[in-house]
Image (spheres, rainbow, N blue to C red):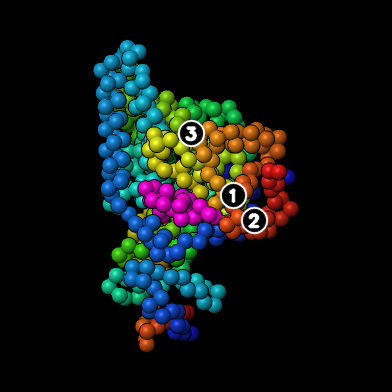
C-alpha cells in the first residue's frame, strides 16, 4: 500500500539541484526546480545502474553523472542518448516545510 | 590465474556482473556540492575559441600543403595537419561525445560527428561504447575500450602510433555495419533502437571514402587522400602517445579511478591537442565536468590523488617498464603512493569480488 514518507526539509535542496533519498532498500532522487517546485524519480539511471544524485540539474533536465544522457525529471522522459528508457517518477507533496514522497 | 578474456560476451564479463563488480558504485573524492555544481557548469566560449583555432589551423596547414605539393617543403605542413586531423579529432570526439565541451547541444553534436569521421569511429556505435567505458572502466569483459590488454601486444601498440590496426579494423567493420548494422559484440552495448543509425552512419562514411578514393584515381595523385583518410595514420601518433598513458600499467577490475587512471602534466601544445584529457583521474571520477574546468577540479581534489606525472616522458618512463613486466606476469600493475591527506584506496570491494584472484601490486 502506498505510503507518504518524509524525505527532507524544503531548504535542504537548492533550487535547480537534487539530493539522494534512500528508503526501505530503494533509492530515489528528489529535485527542486528553478520555479521552486519539487519532484521525485527513481534514484538510478535506467541505462546503467548509476546514482543520479551526482548529476547536473539544468532547468528541468537531470544529466546522468557518468555520461551525457538526460531525463526530464518532471515526467521521467529520456531526452538524450545514451539513455532511452524513461525514468520512473513518484508523487511528492510539500507540507509544513518538509518534502514528502509517496513510496509504493 | 586464468588468462583474462576481454570479449564482451566471455566469462570474465559474466563474472563481473555476477560479483557486482560491473556497474558498481565507484570511489569519489569529496567535493562540496556547491563547488561541484560550479565546476559542472557549461559554457560555449572556450570550445568555440578552441574549435575556431583548430579548424583554422587545419585549413591553413592543408592549404599550404596543397600549394607546395609535391615538394618536400610541404612535409612539415602535412605533419602538422595530420596531428590535428588524426589526434586532435580523438579528444574532440571524446569531449563532444560527453556533451560537455559546448553548452549548446547542436555544437557538441556537429563537432562530434566531424571528429568521429576523422578518427574513423562509427559515431552511432562509439557513443554507447564510451558510456560503458565510464560505467565499467577497465573491468575486464565489460569495458569495450581497453587500450592495453594483458599481456600487452607491443607490436599492435606500436602499429597504433601509425593507425595501422585501427584502419585495418575500420573498413571491414564499416562494410559489415553498412550491410547488417552493428556486429554481435556491438549489440551488447548498442540498444536495438540505434541499430539503424549505426548502419546509416557506416553507409555515409563509406560513400565519402569512396568519393575521395575516386577523386585520387581520377587525379592520378594521393593528394585527396592526404586531406581525407591518410592523416588518420600519419597523424595518429600524438593521440596514441597520450591515450596509452590514460590507464597503461595501472590496475584493472577495481572501482577506484585513482588505481586505474593517470593524470599527466604536459606542454601547452599537447594539452590543446588533447583538450585537457591529461587530467584523466579527475575526468573519470567526475565525467560531467567540462574539459576547461578540469584544472580547477584537479586543484580541488589533488590532496586525495596520487601525484601526477610531471611530463609525458616521465609518464612513459613509469608505464613502459610496467607493461614489459606484464608480459611475464599478467597480474602485475603499478600502485602509486597516495599523499597523507588522501583517503585510502578502495580495494575492499574488488578484492572481495575477485576472491583469491585479487591482483598483486608493484613492490
The span shown in magenta is B282-304
Taken as a whole, is the magenta stretch helix, strand or loop? Answer: helix
The answer to the question of whether label 2 and label 1 lie on touching residues, with beta carbons closer than 8 A, is yes
Up-down relation of residue B99 to residue B165 (above or below): below
Q: Nearer the viewer, mark 1 or mark 3?
A: 1
Q: State the residue at coordinates (55%, 37%).
A: B315
Helix, strand or loop at disc 1? helix
Do dots 2 and 3 share one subunit? yes
Helix, strand or loop at disc 3? helix
Dot 3, crowdedness within 10 Å: few (<14), some or many (≥20)?
A: many
Chain to which mark 2 belongs: B
Dot 2, crowdedness within 10 Å: few (<14), some or many (≥20)?
A: some
Q: Can you tell which mark lies on residue B347?
A: 2
In terms of sequence position, does the residue under pointer 2 or pointer 3 come before the other?
3
State the image quarter where residue B218 is shown: top left
Q: State the residue at coordinates (37%, 84%).
A: A97
- Where does the image place residue A94, in percent across and percent down from the top left? 36, 83
State the image quarter where residue B227 is shown: top left
- Where does the image place residue B112, in percent across and percent down from the top left? 34, 43
Residue A30 visible here: yes
Residue B284 drawn in magenta: yes
Up-down relation of residue B2 to residue A59 (above or below): above
Q: Nearer the viewer, residue A95 or B228?
A: A95
In terms of sequence position, does the residue under pointer 2 or pointer 1 come before the other?
1
Dot 1, crowdedness within 10 Å: few (<14), some or many (≥20)?
A: many
Say which quadrant the N terminus of chain B sits in. top right
Name the outermost residue toward the bottom. Answer: A96
Up-down relation of residue A6 to residue B67 (above or below): below
Q: Which residue is mark 1?
A: B259
Q: Which residue is mark 3?
A: B240
Q: Nearer the viewer, residue B33 or B60?
A: B33
Amino acid at each position: 500500500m502506498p505510503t507518504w514518507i518524509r524525505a527532507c526539509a524544503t531548504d535542504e535542496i537548492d533550487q535547480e539541484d537534487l539530493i539522494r533519498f534512500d528508503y526501505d532498500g530503494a533509492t530515489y532522487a528528489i529535485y527542486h526546480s528553478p520555479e521552486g517546485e519539487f519532484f521525485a524519480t527513481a534514484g538510478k539511471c535506467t541505462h546503467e545502474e548509476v546514482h543520479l544524485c551526482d548529476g547536473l540539474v539544468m532547468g528541468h533536465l537531470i544529466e546522468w553523472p557518468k555520461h551525457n544522457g538526460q531525463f526530464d525529471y518532471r515526467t521521467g522522459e529520456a531526452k538524450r542518448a545514451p539513455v532511452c528508457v524513461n525514468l520512473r517518477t513518484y508523487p511528492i507533496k510539500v507540507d509544513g516545510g518538509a518534502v514528502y514522497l509517496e513510496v509504493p | 590465474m586464468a588468462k583474462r578474456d576481454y570479449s564482451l560476451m566471455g566469462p570474465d564479463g559474466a563474472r563481473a556482473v555476477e560479483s557486482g563488480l560491473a556497474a558498481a558504485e565507484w570511489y569519489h573524492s569529496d567535493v562540496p556540492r556547491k563547488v561541484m555544481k560550479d565546476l559542472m557548469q557549461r559554457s560555449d566560449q572556450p570550445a568555440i575559441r578552441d574549435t575556431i583555432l583548430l579548424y583554422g589551423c587545419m585549413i591553413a596547414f592543408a592549404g599550404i600543403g596543397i600549394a607546395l605539393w609535391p615538394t618536400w617543403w610541404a612535409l612539415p605542413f602535412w605533419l602538422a595537419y595530420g596531428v590535428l586531423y588524426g589526434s586532435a579529432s580523438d579528444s574532440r570526439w571524446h569531449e563532444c561525445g560527453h556533451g560537455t565541451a559546448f553548452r549548446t547541444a547542436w555544437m557538441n553534436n556537429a563537432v562530434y560527428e566531424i571528429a568521429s569521421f576523422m578518427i574513423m569511429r562509427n559515431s552511432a556505435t562509439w557513443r554507447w561504447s564510451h558510456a560503458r567505458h565510464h560505467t565499467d572502466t577497465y573491468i575486464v569483459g565489460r569495458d569495450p575500450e581497453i587500450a592495453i590488454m594483458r599481456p600487452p601486444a607491443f607490436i599492435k601498440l606500436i602499429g597504433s602510433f601509425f593507425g595501422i590496426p585501427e584502419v585495418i579494423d575500420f573498413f571491414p567493420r564499416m562494410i559489415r555495419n553498412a550491410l547488417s548494422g552493428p556486429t554481435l559484440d556491438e549489440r551488447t552495448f548498442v540498444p536495438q533502437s540505434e541499430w539503424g543509425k549505426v548502419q546509416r552512419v557506416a553507409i555515409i562514411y563509406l560513400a565519402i571514402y569512396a568519393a575521395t578514393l575516386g577523386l585520387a584515381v581520377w587525379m592520378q595523385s594521393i593528394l585527396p587522400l592526404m586531406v581525407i583518410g591518410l592523416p588518420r595514420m600519419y597523424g595518429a601518433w600524438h593521440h596514441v602517445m597520450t591515450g596509452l598513458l590514460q590507464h597503461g600499467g595501472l590496475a584493472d577490475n577495481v572501482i577506484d579511478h585513482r588505481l586505474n587512471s593517470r593524470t599527466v602534466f604536459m606542454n601547452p601544445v599537447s594539452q590543446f591537442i588533447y583538450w585537457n584529457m591529461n587530467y584523466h583521474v579527475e575526468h573519470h571520477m567526475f565525467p560531467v565536468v567540462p574539459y576547461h574546468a578540469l584544472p580547477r577540479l584537479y586543484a580541488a581534489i589533488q590532496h586525495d590523488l596520487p601525484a601526477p606525472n610531471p611530463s609525458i616522458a616521465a609518464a612513459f618512463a613509469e608505464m613502459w617498464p610496467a607493461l614489459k613486466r606484464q608480459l611475464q606476469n599478467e597480474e602485475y600493475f603499478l600502485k602509486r603512493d597516495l599523499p597523507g591527506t588522501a583517503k585510502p584506496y578502495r580495494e575492499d570491494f574488488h578484492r572481495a569480488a575477485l576472491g583469491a584472484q585479487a591482483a598483486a601490486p608493484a613492490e
